[in-house]
Amino acid sequence: MANLNVEIPSLKLNDGTSIPPKNWNFAVTYGQALAGANGATAGTAWYKSSADGGIDRKLVDAIKTAIKLGYYHLDGAEVYNTEEEIGIAIKESKVLREKLFVTTKVITNIKDIPNAINLSLKKLQLDYVDLYLIHSPFFASSDSDLQSAWAAMEKVKAEGKAKSIGVSNYFVPHLAATMKTATVTPSINQIEYHPYLQHGGSDGPLLKYMKEHNIANSAYGPLTAVTKAKPGPCDELYAELAKKYYVSDSEIALRWCLDQDVVTITTSGKEERLSDYLRAMTFQMTPKEVNEISEAGEKKHFRGFWQAKFDKDDRS
């Protein structure tokens, strides 16, 4: 298990808010649904199908361990049914609130966002979250639905219940519809992102639109190429780079995102694995190496989530 003390520059979002200086672009998520939001493993690390099952002490302890290791960016969502555990872990860890960057998301109660954020804050035992996201755009049947939801998100921010607001799983039509009436630009779009799903790369419509509007890219599923999508064209390159930098294939996969200034979200229930992932902060790949992984990744297409919403060969 790695014993590391790593420091990383802060990321300033388009609203002027900064994600804290320690591990700003490296988050741990609790939890992830197979058919839902995100996944760095080939399954679900921490996810409760119902909120009626009581407090999961194993999850509370896992979150406390992550905080102890230096994961101060905690990613959750109402649909995961783990907000109560996150709240308890934060309280028991006794870490200063201003050191943490807490994200949660709304989708279950998307039609009543004012109530949804109040419920989330109550479960988290917090006065505010640092980032509040609309979990996906697929609830909407019209542009008006997207615009109404975003107007409610803007009110959440104005009331001080969220420092920053953003979206997840949005594509250009969803972003464009939202921006038509927005007074606040989404700070982040959290999307599945890895070498086998690059959304057309930096010149593709999605990432290009996000860059033009200063919307940060947050990646879930960054380990897909070394987990559920193996074998693939990146395998040999990952192995070579892992040997060069004395790390694992997983840390190369994480570094590929980090070296593109992407907020990178991973997960694990194992302390050793979370500790080892921090090695991704101790080195930097060359631009050529990052590009080589990107080029290799284009030889294969794999979408780990929301498959039912896209054609088999849709790389958008």
Image: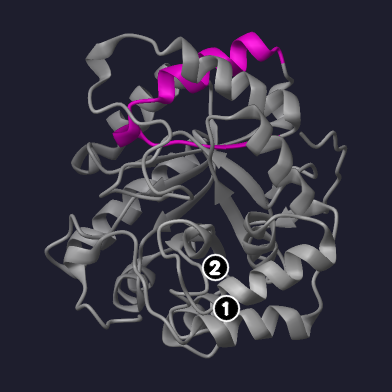
Given residues 132 and 305, the one toward you in this image is 305
Q: Position of residue 147 (x, y in %)?
A: 27, 62
Q: Are marks 2 and 1 in contact (CB under 8 Å)?
A: yes
Given residues 91 and 165, the one toward you in this image is 91
The answer to if 121 sits in the magenta stretch is: no
Q: Residue drawn 78% across and 48% down?
A: 279
Label 1 crowd (10 A; few <14 / some 14-19 / many >=20): few
C-alpha span from label 2 to label 1: 6 Å
**Above or below, 87 relative to 222:** above
Q: With 11 as the anchor, is 42 left or right in this view?
A: left
Amino acid under label 2?
Ile
Q: Position of residue 269 (x, y in %)?
A: 53, 30
Magenta stretch: give its range. 71-94
The residue that disc 1 covers is 211
Q: Residue drawn 76% across and 34% down?
A: 1
Q: Residue drawn 19% across and 59% down?
A: 145
Q: With 196 as the anchor, is 49 left or right in this view?
A: left
The residue that disc 2 covers is 215
Amino acid under label 1?
Lys
The answer to if 84 sits in the magenta stretch is: yes
Q: With 216 as the anchor, is 94 left or right in this view?
A: right
